[in-house]
Amino acid sequence: MEQSLRPFHPVPNENERYELQGVSVLPPQGPWRFAFARGNESGSWLDPADGDHVARKHANLLKFARMASTDYRRAGAFILIRRPSIVGADMVALHARVEQGVRAEIRDRLQYERAEADVSVDRSLGRPCVRVVFHTMDRPSWPTVRKVRRGTTFWCPALTATSRFVQIGFFDEFPPGAEPLPIEEEVGRFLGSFAASAS
C-alpha cells in the first residue's frame, strides 16, 4: 500500500459496514481511511499489491490505511476478492499452494535480511481458512526506507462460491527500532465482522 493517503477517504462512521462483491466488514476502529481499488491478484502472497483506485462497483479490493504523521510507520487492513482457483475449497490443496508461494517470497535475499512466515489451517474467522503470519526485515542496502513488516493474512473460500476466495488481513510497517502502531485491537473488530458473516 502506497505511502500517500491522498487516494484514501476518512472513515465517516465506524459502525457502517462496507460491502465488496457480497462480502461486508466493519472498518477498523481509530483514525483509519479507506479506498476501493482494482487489486492485482498476481502480487504478494503476504498482502495484496496496490491497484488502481476505482468506484466500488468496479472494485475487488477494499483497503484501509493508517499512518503516523511524522515518520515512516504505517498500517493497512484489506479484503480482496480473488478469482476462482483450481483448488476450490480443498483446504489441503489450498494450504500447499499458499505455503509454496509464501516460502518462495520470503526467500528473496535481495530484499530481506530476515524473513519468517508460518502457514496453517485456522478456524478463528468462523470458517476454515489458511492463515499466514509473517515478519520481515529489509536489508540495509534495500533501495527504499528500511522497514520491519509484520502481518497476518487469511485465505478463505467464499461461502457463496466455493471456487472463489476472500483474502483478508492486516499488516504494519516501521523502521527498525521504532515502535509499531497499536493496531491489533483496532483491527480486531474488522476481522470479527467478517467472522460473524460466516455464522
Image: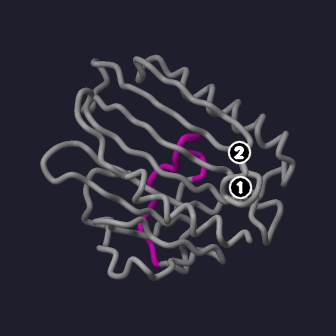
Q: Residues within 10 Å of mark 1 (few under 14, many from 20)?
A: many
The image quadrant that residue 36 belongs to is bottom left
Residues at marks 2 and 1, CA–CA distance in whole angstroms: 7 Å
Counting from the top left corner in percent of width and height, residue 33 is at 33, 67
Principal SS element in the magenta part?
loop
Which secondary structure lies at badge 1?
A: strand
Q: Are marks 2 and 1 in contact (CB under 8 Å)?
A: yes
The residue type indicated by label 1 comes to Cys
In the rendered image, which residue does mark 1 sit on? Answer: 156
Counting from the top left corner in percent of width and height, residue 157 is at 76, 58
Q: Which of the marked residues, 2 or 1, is nearer the chain's N terminus?
A: 2
- 95 vs 72, left or right, is right
> Which image quarter is the C terminus in?
bottom right
Query: What's the image's color scheme?
Result: one colour
What residue lies at 66% left-to-right and 60% top-to-bottom?
Answer: 166
What residue lies at 54% left-to-right and 75% top-to-bottom?
Answer: 58
Find residue 89 and name its label: none
**Magenta segment includes 44:** yes
- 136 vs 133, left or right, is left
**Magenta segment includes 15:** no
What residue lies at 47% left-to-right and 31% top-to-bottom?
Answer: 135
In the rendered image, which residue does mark 2 sit on? Answer: 130
- In this rendering, the answer to whether 105 lies above or below 155 is above
In magenta, the rendered stretch is 41-55
